[in-house]
Structures are given as C-alpha cells and as structure tokens.
Image (cartoon, helix red, strand yellow):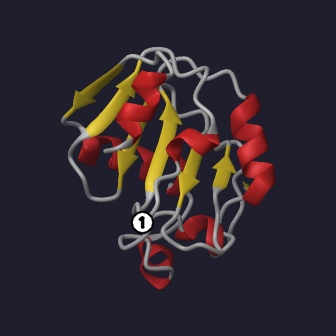
Amino acid sequence: MSQIRTLNAKGIQTEILQNGIELQQKWEEVFAGNLSKGQKQKILFKICMWHIFSYEKMKHISGQAAEGAFNQLKKGKCFLFFHDAEETIFMENANSVKAKDLHVHGQTELYMVDGNFSWTFVLTHEADLGPYFCKPDNVGGE
C-alpha cells in the first residue's frame, strides 16, 4: 500500500484496518444493489466490481472528468480499499487527497468511499478504462 507514504507525506493521518471484505460488501450493496445476481454474473462483477461502470450499469463520470469531480469534493472521513483485500486505509480527514495521490504504477483496483458511502472513486488496472466517479443517487442500468 504505497499510497500510505504519499498520504502521510501530505499530512493525512492514516490507519490500517482489517475490514476490507465488509467494506466491499457495503460497496456492492450501495453501488450495485440494483443489479440481480444474474446481471452481476454477466458482467463478471465478482472479478472486478468496477464493471458496473464499464458495462454502463450505473451512471458515472470517467476519465479526467472523474478526477476533476473527485479533486473538488469535500471528503472528510474516507476508506480506501482494494479488491479482495482485508486491509483498508482509513483517513479521518481526506480533504486534501487528490486523484494523483492514489495512482500507483501497476496497482490493482482501488476503491475510495466516504464514511457514508455517498460517493466512490475507482481506479482500475486497465489503462484505457476509468477512473470512475459515482454518487449512488445516480442509479442507472437495465
């Protein structure tokens, strides 16, 4: 989790927690709760949760627009987690976190949410897909 060094260098206090699977389940409930089990299987959701965005199952913004929206957001308490990892990074005040702080060459999927799951910012392992920014009140899909 090399992001910790970057965040700490910016004066952001971080804490490692062991609740990654729980956070992923909550993320699925909030951001993909409108999809049936069959729809999730069709888009390989369990392999890459961000497929809800690349398969256009939820309204979102992507690319530089997503980074811009994320950078301007007032963040407060946030969680940073990785697909299928138990360790997460908790930040009491993530307001100064910018998209560039989260990019790590060769990093797998990275998900950031605020404490209320009112938005998410997602980086993917695919150079030509993402990043994605979404607020769950923008529910779309089939």
The percent coordinates of residue 127 (x first, y second) are 59, 72
Quarter of the rendering containing residue 141 = bottom right
Q: Would you say 106 lies left or right of 10 here?
A: left
> Which quadrant is home to the C terminus?
bottom right
Q: Say if 15 sits above or below 42 in the image.
A: above
When the figure is inspected, residue 38 is found, relative to residue 85, above or below; the finding is below
Residue situated furthest bottom in the rendering: 42
Residue beneath the point at 54% across and 56% down: 123
Q: Residue at x 60, y 33 (%)?
A: 118
Where residue 96 sits: x, y (%)?
Answer: 61, 22
Q: Classify residue 43 as left or right of residue 138.
A: left
Q: Is 67 situated left or right of 106 in this image?
A: right
The image quadrant of residue 73 is: top right
Say which amino acid is labelled 1. Gly
Mark 1, other Cα within 10 Å: few <14 / some 14–19 / many ≥20 = few
Residue for badge 1: 106
Which of the pair 47/65 is nearer the observer?
Answer: 65
State the SS at label 1. loop
**Residue at the location (78% across, 42% down)?**
68
Above or below, 58 relative to 75:
below
Residue 129 is situated, as x and y percent measured from the top left of the image, at 64, 71
